[in-house]
Amino acid sequence: MKYYLIAGEASGDLHASNLMDGLKKEDPHAEFRFFGGDLMSAKGGVLVKHYRDMAFMGFMPVLLNLKTILRNMKTCEEDIKLYNPDVVILIDYPGFNLKIAKFVKTVLNIPVYYYISPKIWAWKQYRIKSFKKYVDKMFCILPFEPDFFRKLNYKVTYVGNPSVDSVANRTCANETFAQFIGENQLQDKPVIALLAGSRRQEIKDNLPTMLDAVSGFTEFQYVIAGAPGIDPGYYKEYIGNHKASIVFDQTYRLLQQSKAALVTSGTATLETALFRVPQVVCYKTPVKKLVRFVFTHFFHIKYISLVNLIADKTVVQELFADSFSCQAIREELNKIIRVEAYRNTMLEGYDEVISRLGSPGASHRAARYMFESLSTPK
C-alpha cells in the first residue's frame, strides 16, 4: 500500500518514523511519501518537505509566515493528489493537519487516519467537529483520552504511548557515564540536563532563565539537549558566559546520565519521567498574568505537563506564566536534588505514570490496526 504521512515537528518525526517501522512489518510492500524529518527519511520513502520549514509557533510567527504556511499547504494538497495514496496518516500538528484532512476527505475521498490526537482535551474542543467529519480513525497515545472522547460521542483507539517504545528501544541503554562524557568531551561531574524546547522561540524564551537558575549548582555540569534542526550558533547567542555544554541528537543519552533536569512542557516531560529523572517543568510566556487567567478560566485541564495530566495529580512542579522565575526554578531544583524525601516522592509518582501508560509496542499496535482496517473489505 501507499502511505502519505504528515508530521510537522521533531516529536512527530520520531513517532512517525517508529510507525513506519511498524507498517513495514505489517505490509512488506509499503511505500511512503511524507512531510516530516530526518528520522522518517532514514526509514525510506520520499521526503517532500522538512518540518523545520513548517514549525511556526505562536500568533505573531504564524501571521508573519502566513504566505509560507499557505504555500506549504497547497504543496501538500497537490502532492497528495498526485501520489494518490491508500491512506493519509496525520501526526498531531492540528493547525495544518486538520485543514489537510478536510481537503483529503471532501476532494479526494481518501481515508484519513490520525495518529497522536491533537490535545483538544486542553482547549479548542470545537475541533471534535472536524474529527467527526474528516477523520476516519483516531489512534490515541494517552490513557485518559478514550474516556474524554467517549463523552464527546467519538470512538478512538488507545494503542499505548510511543515514548515508552522509544525509551525501551534506545540504543544507549547499556552506556556508562564514563562513555557518555568521554565521547562528548564533558566533565567528570554529575549532570543537570536542560531541555529548552525544540523550537527557536521556546529556546529564546526559556534557555537564558534556565542557565541563570542552574548557575549556583557548582558541583554539577549543565548540558543542553540540542534540538534537531537548530544551528549550534543559535544556542551560543543565549549561553553567553555560562559554563554550559551542548549535545545534539542525544537527548536520551543525556537523560540517562542526568541527576536532574529543567524541562519545557511537552513530550520531553514524559520522556524525562520515563528515565526517572527528577525534573522541574518551566515554561516562560508573555503577559504572564493574562496567560494565567486564560489557563485558569478557559482551559479544560489543571496541568500543562503530560506527567501530571496522566497521574491526575501534581507529581512535578509546573513553573509557567506568573510562577516562572529564576528564583522559583532554583528553589525547586534544589529540592529535587538535595531533599531525598521530596525526590523519592516524585520518583514514586513517575512509577504510577509508567504503570498507567502500559507496555511497549504502541507504534506496532497502531500500524497493525491501520493495516488490518485498510485491508478489510468495505
Image (tube, rainbow, N blue to C red):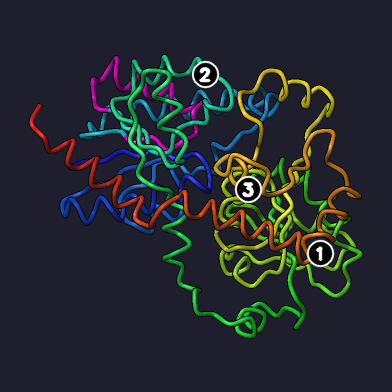
Q: Position of residue 242 (x, y in %)?
A: 87, 63
Residue positioned 38% across, 56% down in the render: 359
- Looking at the rendered structure, the secondary structure element under dot 1 is loop
Residue 237: give its label. Answer: none
Say if 21 sits above or below 58 in the image: below
Q: Using the rendered view, name the quadrant where residue 249 is placed.
A: bottom right
For the residues carrying marks 1 and 2, which lies nearer the camera in this image?
1
Q: Which residue is mark 1?
A: 339
Question: On the rendered image, what quadrant is the N terminus found in?
Answer: top left
Question: On the rendered image, what quadrant is the C terminus found in?
Answer: top left
Left/right placement of residue 49 relative to residue 195 reads left
Q: Residues within 10 Å of mark 2 (few under 14, many from 20)?
A: some
Give how far apart the Cα atoms at labels 1 and 2 are: 40 Å
- Which one is earlier in the sequence, the residue at label 1 or at label 3? 3
Q: Position of residue 266 (x, y in %)?
A: 60, 44
Amino acid type, residue under disc 1 in the picture: Val
Residue positioned 49% across, 26% down in the render: 71
- 96 or 269: nearer the viewer: 269
- 149 or 137: nearer the viewer: 149
Residue positioned 78% across, 34% down in the render: 285
Residue 198: give its label. Answer: 3
